[in-house]
Image (cartoon, helix red, strand yellow):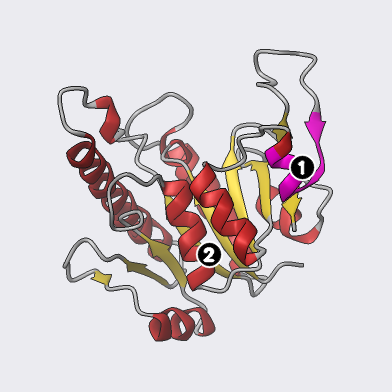
Amino acid sequence: MYTRVLLKLSGEALSGEGVKGFSEEKLEHLISEIKSVVENNVKLGLVIGAGNLLRGRELKDLSVEIADEIGMLGTVINSLYLKNKLEKSGLKVIIMSQIVNLPAIKPINYDDIEYHLSKGFVIIFAGGTSNPFFTTDTAAALRAVEMKAELIVKATKVDGIYDKDPKRFPDAKKFEKLSFDEALEKGLEVLDIEAFSICKRYKIPIKVINFFEKNILLKALLDDRIGSIVKP
């Protein structure tokens, strides 16, 4: 079983597919999935996007850097919201970010990361990489290295890695296990190229799962046959 994990969530994990805002039903599912692994002594970090609020680059009339900074602030809003919901469920949670100075958020500090993980806190890393031009995929890879994660779990709406969109193509082929080089050769978009490069360099496996299935996160950490995995 993997015991130190970075979970990469899209904003849709808070709202539902193609929906803006927050869904109590989706939040209950998310909280249940997180609690199940924390109760099994998994040290967990989270990176969450902001697609349920807005994606910075949807703002067409803005420069890329400003649009990205707006998107980064969206991830802070989601992180604060999720922290409060998780704490009400009985979990210990801390948010770390380099882009804001708020009472509920601490700066990213390697000693603090290790301390809070050892004390059973879930750490939410907010604000992306702290620089525009990078996606939350890259933020997830960077934070995974910083927390010494054994695995990145990418929570999606499909049950693994396919050669094409299985929702559009019934003949899509699923890959259960791949090496980094095989994924590159096949042109599979597991994470964006910057994030994938970080994972390859630091030998951090990437697992892709359908996060909307019940009890999927714990199952995925227990069994490599769940979802698809890219390994060194």
Q: Residues within 10 Å of mark 1 (few under 14, many from 20)?
A: few
Give the x, y percent position of residue 192. 52, 41
Q: Is residue 71 visible?
A: yes
Element under disc 1: helix
Above or below — where is 5 with respect to 165?
below
5 vs 166, left or right, is: left
Position of residue 73 measured from the top left corner of the image (x, y, whole percent) = 23, 49
Q: Name which residue type carries label 2.
A: Ala
Which residue occupies the foreground of this view, 67 or 202? 202
Q: Quadrant of residue 86?
A: bottom left
Residue located at (33% from left, 68% from top): 96
Task: Answer with left or right where residue 107 lies relative to residue 171.
Answer: left
- Corner quadrant of residue 189: top right
85 within the magenta span: no
Side of 171 where 192 appears, left or right: left
Amino acid under disc 1 = Glu
In this view, 7 is above or below 66: below
**Quadrant into which the C terminus falls:** bottom right
Tag 2 and tag 1, C-beta contact below 8 Å: no
- The disc label shown at residue 35, or none: none
Which numbered disc, 2 or 1, marks the residue that appears first in the sequence? 2
Residue at image coords 50%, 84%: 119
The tag on residue 182 is 1
Between residue 185 and residue 37, name the one nearer to us: 185
Residue 87: x %, y % from top left: 39, 65
Give the total number of marks visible in the rendering. 2
User: Relative to residue 120, is residue 22 depicted above or below?
Assistant: above
Q: Residue at x 82, y 56 (%)?
A: 223
Which region is colored magenta? 174-184
Read off the residue under disc 2: 144
Q: Position of residue 135 (x, y in %)?
A: 40, 44
